[in-house]
Image: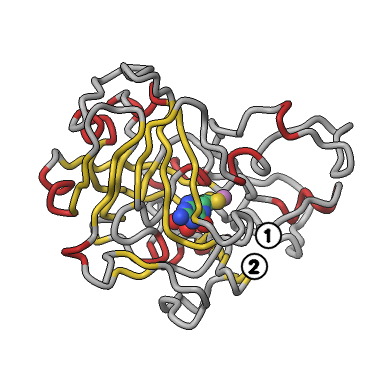
Amino acid sequence: MPGLTAPSDYAEEPPRHPALRINSKEPFNAEPHRSALVSSYITPVDFFYKRNHGPIPKVDDISRYSVSISGLVNKHIQLSMDDIRMLPKYNVTATLQCAGNKRTAMSKVRKVRGVGWDVSALGNATWGGAKLSDVLELVGIHKLSSVTSLGGKHVEFVSVDRCKEEKGGPYKASIPLKQATDPDADVLLAYEMNGETINRDHGYPLRVVVPGVIGARSVKWLDSINIIKEECQGFFMQKDYKMFPPTVDWDNINWSTRRPQMDFPVQSAICTLEDVDVIKEGKVRITSMIERDV
Ligand SMILES: Nc1nc2c(c(=O)[nH]1)N[C@H]1C(S)=C(S)[C@@H](COP(=O)(O)O)O[C@H]1N2
Ligand SMILES: [Mo]
């Protein structure tokens, strides 16, 4: 049996906290209520939003799990979990935010496609793992390089989960090689979340975390890394997660005219109130999360 497999249906989903607001059951998409989101600076794993495009993969035998690195590099390798754990371990506290956050509110202005989210499709976690820049050195790609000797300019991450958008194929995404090889960009292959082994919903046994970039590029259940010339041609890079001016609609969209969305500022929202709450007229004191924690 291979180390990591993708179920074809939802019969073996992991348990989830009953307090989550479920936006779609299959695939499972859920977020915490606003008050739960702001109750701590580090979002507990149970309350961290879960964003999936298919059934959650399963590890049958962790000793057989490996991630391959191939493509436009001279050396192709397979790394086991032990190999990854042998590299220096970093803990990076970073906010992961889905590009679809606040979609429900946006739809009130103009209809948006996709799963509806309130304001909590984001979370702040401490991710533990190896730096991608260290991993890429194992195949001879030096720190801060933006092109390999064979012409590779992008790093593609491929999972095993089956998505209908990929016609049953796996979820995938890429980032520029320059970002992947920059130790200061803190791109991780993470095996821990908030000090514990990362759970199935969040990418067990290994996921990518790309700080500062839309959540869609932080590929979960990592199966292979490919060094490629052009950016990944997957659905979520080319036919989704792009920004267009208001003149563009579904009947006149030309996807190739825009780059995939990458950098994404963290959004703010008032979380101690729900949309239906009413407050008295007058002065209101607003306290930020950061202010509360320091
Ligand atoms: N393999 C895989 N990786 C994935 C996804 C997915 O469906 N499959 N969803 C992406 C999206 S759109 C987001 S916003 C984040 C969500 O990560 P989380 O569920 O750990 O919060 O994972 C990304 N990585
Ligand atoms: Mo997302």
CA–CA distance between discs 1 and 2?
Answer: 7 Å
Residue 288 location in percent, x, y?
A: 52, 43
Whether residues under marks 1 and 2 lie with C-beta atoms below 8 angstroms apart, the answer is: yes
- Image height of 254 relative to 65, above or below: above
**Residue at the spot of label 2:** 23
Q: Amino acid at mark 2?
A: Asn
Label total for image: 2
| Label 1 CB-ligand 2 distance < 8 A | no
In what element is the residue under mark 1?
A: loop
Q: Amino acid at mark 1?
A: Val
Pick the front one: 113 or 275: 113
Q: Residues within 10 Å of mark 2 (few under 14, many from 20)?
A: some
Pick the front one: 107 or 278: 107
Pick the front one: 214 or 41: 214
Residue 93 location in percent, x, y?
A: 33, 42
Single out the residue that lies furthest toward the left: 86
Q: Quadrant of the C terminus?
A: top left
Say left or right for 262 vs 119: left
Residue 21 is labelled as none
**Residue at the spot of label 1:** 115
Say left or right for 179 vs 74: right
Q: Residues within 10 Å of mark 1 (few under 14, many from 20)?
A: some
Q: Could you tell me if residue 122 is visible in this image?
A: no
In what element is the residue under mark 2?
A: strand
